[in-house]
């Protein structure tokens, strides 16, 4: 009599397709992730329980914090490459500092900076690693030479020209910064009729 | 699931030397494991690295326009003043005829939040109208830190106080109160 053989089922599944998908996604995430560059002005933001995220583009960040020498400094950062290019172009034209096409491209890949416009070219020419080490004095915000105001005006106009969108403005203040310093920045914003802006904060536990 | 190349089982029995049949299947389990681990890592880091923010709306600052003189019931207002070294003073109503306080209070759960929640409730009871809730006036002093302001704004978000204003003018009496140790 012929024996009925039980068909032995193979336990292994074909993983090829799964592997393909996994690596495709992996490649996507690696490529979209941006490497974090050390900030020129390290700021320790205060924490809050609010969980709104900042937008990725059309955003200007004003950082206020104490530098290594203990003085309060103001740094400026714009997100979005095209916007940065256009802003630098506008600033150069407004304050009479010439920037080459190469400068603009380099500037568009940079992060925050804190120098008067006249010395911005030196910062642009530096290597990324050296920028954070360079002792940047901060953007002048005195009433006589208020370059932050100009930066804001020019970048806001550039945002409208490029994307027809109002530029979002965020203030990233150090937790230990004195309130009058922050107030000064808020006043500059309010002078331009920017009455809504974001305060960058860190995360705080739920049971605070 | 491990599947090693076993080749043919009964090799070398007879005299014939058979060429080994290679199994073309490779075990992908470990590779897939690794891939998914990395995916998870990159997914989480891209979304978590985005900074958080709280949005703040300030009233229009127009120098030419004088105060409209919108009068609000002083019984609905609560003034919170921030001073040096995390000092916090609050009072209800007018400083000359306060309903409560002026009193020093702590930041956080046990201090200002408890008070805010209680006052919020009592103001609604007083007005009898849900839309006419408490109005908080935040006065950050010259020596207060930015952290203090964010903390108080955070309290507003936590307690759900919708109407608040940041005011920078201090009366001499308020300054005195804030400077007092």
Image (tube, coloured by chain):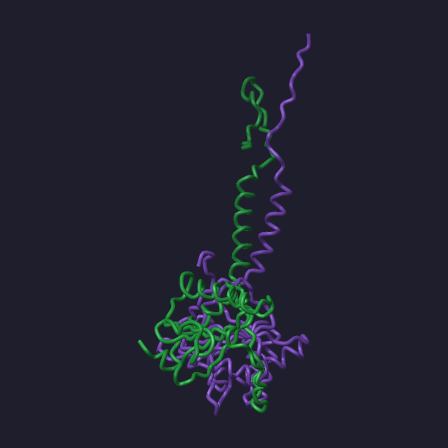
Residue placed furthest toward the top: A1
Quarter of the image that includes the N terminus of chain B: top right
Instruction: Locate residue A172, reporting x and y percent.
Output: 48, 72
Mark yes or no: residue B148 visible: yes
Residue A41, visible in the rendered structure = no
Tell me residue B167's x, y (percent): 49, 80
Q: Supply the letter of whichever chain is green.
A: B
What residue is shown at x 65% (from left), y 16% (from top)? A5
Considering only vertical position in the picture, is A202 above or below A24? below
Q: Please give left or right for residue B91 compared with residue B48 in the image.
A: left
Name the image quarter holding the C terminus of chain B.
bottom left
**Closer to us: A130 or B166:** B166
Closer to us: B107 or A188:
B107
Q: Residue furthest left?
A: B181
Residue at (53, 70) in percent of width and height: B134
Q: Colour of chain A?
A: purple
Which of these two is toward me, B30 or B175? B175
In the rendered image, the vertical position of residue A89 relative to residue A40, given as above or below: below
């Amino acid at each position: 009599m012929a024996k009925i053989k039980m068909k032995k089922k193979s336990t292994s599944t074909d993983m090829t397709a799964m592997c393909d998908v996994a690596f495709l996604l992996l490649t996507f995430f690696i490529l979209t992730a941006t490497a974090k560059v050390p900030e020129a002005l390290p700021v320790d933001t205060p924490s809050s329980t609010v969980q709104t995220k900042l937008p990725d583009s059309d955003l200007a960040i004003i950082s206020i914090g104490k530098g290594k020498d203990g003085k309060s400094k103001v740094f400026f950062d714009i997100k979005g490459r095209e916007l940065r290019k256009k802003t630098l172009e506008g600033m150069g034209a407004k304050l009479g500092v010439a920037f080459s096409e190469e400068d603009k491209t380099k500037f568009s890949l940079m992060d925050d900076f804190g120098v008067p416009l006249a010395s911005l070219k030196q910062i642009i020419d530096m290597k990324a690693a050296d920028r954070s080490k360079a002792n940047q004095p901060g953007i002048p915000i005195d009433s006589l030479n208020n370059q932050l105001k100009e930066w804001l005006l020019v970048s806001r106009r550039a945002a409208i020209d490029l994307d027809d969108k109002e530029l979002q403005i965020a203030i990233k203040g150090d937790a230990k910064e004195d309130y009058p310093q922050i107030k000064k920045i808020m006043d500059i914003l309010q002078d331009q009729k920017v009455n809504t802006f974001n305060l960058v904060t860190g995360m705080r536990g739920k049971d605070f | 699931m491990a599947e090693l190349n076993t080749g043919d089982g009964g090799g070398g029995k007879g005299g014939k030397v058979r060429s080994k049949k290679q199994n073309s299947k490779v075990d992908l389990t470990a590779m897939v494991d690794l891939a998914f681990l990395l995916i998870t890592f990159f997914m989480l880091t891209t979304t978590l690295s985005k900074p958080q923010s709280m949005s703040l709306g300030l009233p229009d600052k127009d120098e030419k326009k004088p105060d409209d003189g919108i009068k609000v019931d002083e019984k609905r207002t609560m003034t919170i003043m921030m001073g040096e070294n995390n000092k916090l003073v609050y009072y209800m109503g007018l400083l000359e005829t306060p309903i409560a306080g002026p009193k020093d209070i702590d930041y956080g759960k046990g201090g200002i939040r408890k008070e805010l929640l209680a006052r919020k409730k009592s103001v609604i009871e007083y007005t009898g109208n849900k839309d006419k809730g408490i109005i908080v006036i935040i006065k950050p002093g010259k020596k207060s830190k930015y952290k203090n302001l964010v903390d108080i704004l955070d309290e507003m978000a936590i307690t759900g106080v919708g109407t608040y204003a940041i005011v920078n003018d201090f009366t001499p009496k308020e300054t005195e109160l804030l400077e007092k140790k």
